[in-house]
Image (tube, rainbow, N blue to C red):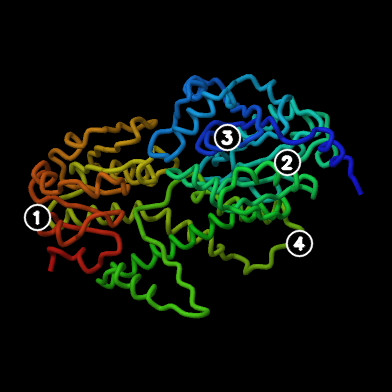
Amino acid sequence: MATELSAALNQRGPIRTIGVIGMGYVGIPSAALFASVPGIRRAYGFQRNSPTSGYKIRMLNEGKNPLKGEEPGLDKLLADVVHKGVFHCTDDFTSIQECDAVTIAIQTPFKSPEDLIPDLTALEEGLRQAGRYLTRGTLVVLESTITPGTTCGWAREVLEEESGLLAGRDFALAHAPERVMVGRLIQNIQEHDRIVGGIDEDSTRRAIELYQPVLTKGQIIPMTATAAEVTKTAENTFRDLQIAAANQLALYCEAMGVNFYDVRTGIDSLKGDGITRAILWPGAGVGGHCLTKDTYHLERGVDVAGRTPLDYPQGHESLFVLARHVNDFMPRHTFHLVRQGLSCVGKEVSGSRIAILGFSFLPNTDDARNTPTEQFVNICQIHGAVTEIHDPWVHEYPGFSLSSDIEPVVKDADVLVLMTAHRMYYALDYDWVKRMMRPFPVLVDGRNIVDPDVIIRAGFVYEGIGRGDKNRYPRD
């Protein structure tokens, strides 16, 4: 039986005009891919013309990519869709009334790391802009990572309040979470399976119609909106848990004087029916917009979307929250290795010069959101160290001085700390680095970038995460 919504969607016809609110790491590649779909007449990118992000409007309309770092395929795709006149970026949100579908890709950070309450200010503004110009038969899709229960609850209420329309009757509403990694945005959108969850069956079908043409290898996985929210927050929570398990094991290996990477190889060698091993890599900390907060979105969802009380041992933190604590601890452990290395050569942290290589949280990108390097630098400075930071991609960040020239960063340094696995650090001439540093230099490898034996032979005191077999040199 046809519903009022299905009738509104049929009257609207096929999706031909698409709007994407939020021109960031998700919105830009999504809008460009929508614009490349045959039959799409126009894809709008909606962006506030603010002092900090308004420059994106001009760059995008010139066919230029405002995202720094390596993003294969994105530069050419943007140039093509702008040249063909299909894609246009604007701060004029009234054009939403032309759109058959509108997606919202706006960050949902925490207000502060202490209260872990999501800051929905920017998302609410995006929702209100969409609702203000919403017309009958439009599809609205939230791509932002959100607490389970948000789409069917708060987001729906905001859209209905602004539009005067009813979700599920006058317009379709769905959640289709982004599943991308900076550095391979286009590939991820096209090749990863797409989770699509509508507030009803008509909304789900319309959202599938929107995303299906963009996929090359990926498949559509339909479900409810709340299940889609749980899927997104849970998959990031599980990855965070896997990283925490590797970090915890690395700490054990250091304490017992063994090589984590030997242990990892040994564990991974056991294969067969019913045997699953998914040991990731330890490191100096977990950063980014997703893994650092999605555990808490998932936890909060039990209250927001919960239908029955949670049955769980009272007074105990969840396994997921414990994993978060382990990963949050790793920058502090990296500092412990710095202090341990300096003690080998009779130096104190206070007054030492620490050269830090890498500020972004991901290799070969400028994405420094929630970077663990920020916490590490703050710890070093609290203990009286002088810090210098090099990054080839991140040129500025509030409250920090960054250099794209490595020489002044490493010159006269007591400690070199590898915080990000940028490609250039693998090829760095560490003999030259040693000559630039002060006598008896210390190298702390937070990302398993260098060969400890090579570094030790070059004359460094080596300290590495998970390298209990080498971190004792030269104390024994």
Percent across and percent down for residue 238 are 53, 60
Q: Is residue 21 above or below residue 474?
A: above
User: Which is nearer the eye, 113 or 27?
Assistant: 27
Q: Are marks 3 and 4 in contact (CB under 8 Å)?
A: no
Q: Residue placed at 77% from the left, 44% from the top?
A: 203
Q: Which mark is residue 459?
A: 1
Quarter of the image for the C terminus: give it. bottom left
Percent across and percent down for residue 243 are 43, 60
Q: CA distance from mark 3 to mark 2?
A: 33 Å
Q: Which residue matches tag 4?
A: 308
- Local crowd at mark 2 within 10 Å, few (<14), some, or many (≥20)? few
Q: Amino acid at mark 1?
A: Gly
Q: Which residue matches tag 2?
A: 154
Front tag of 1 and 3: 3
Front tag of 3 and 2: 3
Q: Which residue matches tag 3?
A: 36
Sequence-wise, which precedes: disc 1 or disc 3?
3
